[in-house]
Image (cartoon, grey):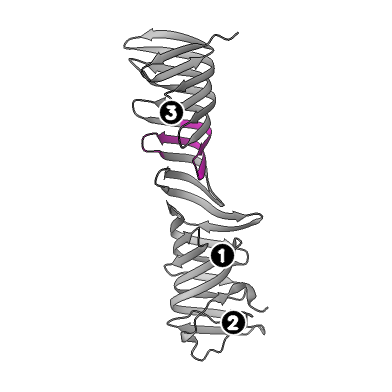
Amino acid sequence: MNLILILLVAKFSYEADSVKIIPKKGLDLIAAKGNINLNDGKTFITGDSALIFKSSDIDSGFIYGNVSIKGEEIEISCKKAKYSFLNEEAEFFENVRVKGKEESIFADHIKYFTKKNFAVARGNILIEKEDIKIFCKEANYDFKKKRGNINLIEKVQIVSGDKEINLYGNKIEVAPDTLYFTGDVRIEGGKESGKGDTLIYVEKEEVAYLKGNPVFYFEKGNAKGEEIELKFKDRKIEKGKILKKSLLEILTEKEEKVIINTYIIESFFDEEGNIKNLKGFDKVEGIIFLNKIKK
């Protein structure tokens, strides 16, 4: 039969199969092994072994092994954890996973501030939010406000089944339903790709906006403008709209190059993929049907 020792200190309780208490000047050092369970009624921490520093309260310590932390709105798992109840913060190491209501963060190291519900991640990071995956090396995220900042980005994937669109940028600001990319941004999906200084992706609308000298490449040409709007469908780039001063280069079905330079271009193709009558084209309303251009 396992010996279970329960320490009740203020509002915290601590359980373990075996415990050794080592008195030190001004505090007690508690070494515990087996079925660690530390909680305050709201946050529950479990693991294989622990080293706890206790003065008048359970102040701080380390948890080792299969560490699991469960709170009201968040779950965390890792191989090693360092926590401080006084500072209301914790650090997690090795195979770290933080799971919120709508998103999950995987990383080598995460520091979590319990009062603010705020996390700072470092190392090989993967952030999953519905069908979006963000791969990076440095990130911070506010689970309450659903906002964060991401640096050292590898790529962002918008995934649906075996289809995906990849987004790139030097930095990302994460907001509810929107991702803001800055610095050498790119978008790649199927046979289409684009680049610019800024990229805004709106999740619910499945639309992206390329700004800052944007260029968009499709199978039969490319488009340039002050702003390019891209509409997705089933995780594929379906439509494009060029806004303001624009330049469009296309190849016709006879492989003839057409170059159009105007102040406003909104559409050059009908729904069958044919080039519209270019007379008065600057007044035409519509979009480029990228997936319907005749070969």
46 to the left or right of 24: right
Q: Residue at x 66, y 79 (%)?
A: 294
* Mark identifier at residue 232: 1
What x and y, as percent, mark residue 105? 51, 41
Q: Residue at x 40, y 38 (%)?
A: 117
Q: Which residues are drawn in magenta?
A: 92-118
What x and y, as percent, mark residue 120? 42, 40
* Mark identifier at residue 270: 2
* Mark identifier at residue 42: 3
Label 3, label 2: how far apart the Cα atoms are: 60 Å
Residue 264 occupies quadrant: bottom left
Quarter in which the C terminus is drawn: bottom right
Amino acid under disc 1: Phe
Label 3, label 1: how far apart the Cα atoms are: 42 Å
Amino acid under disc 3: Lys
> Is residue 125 shown in magenta?
no
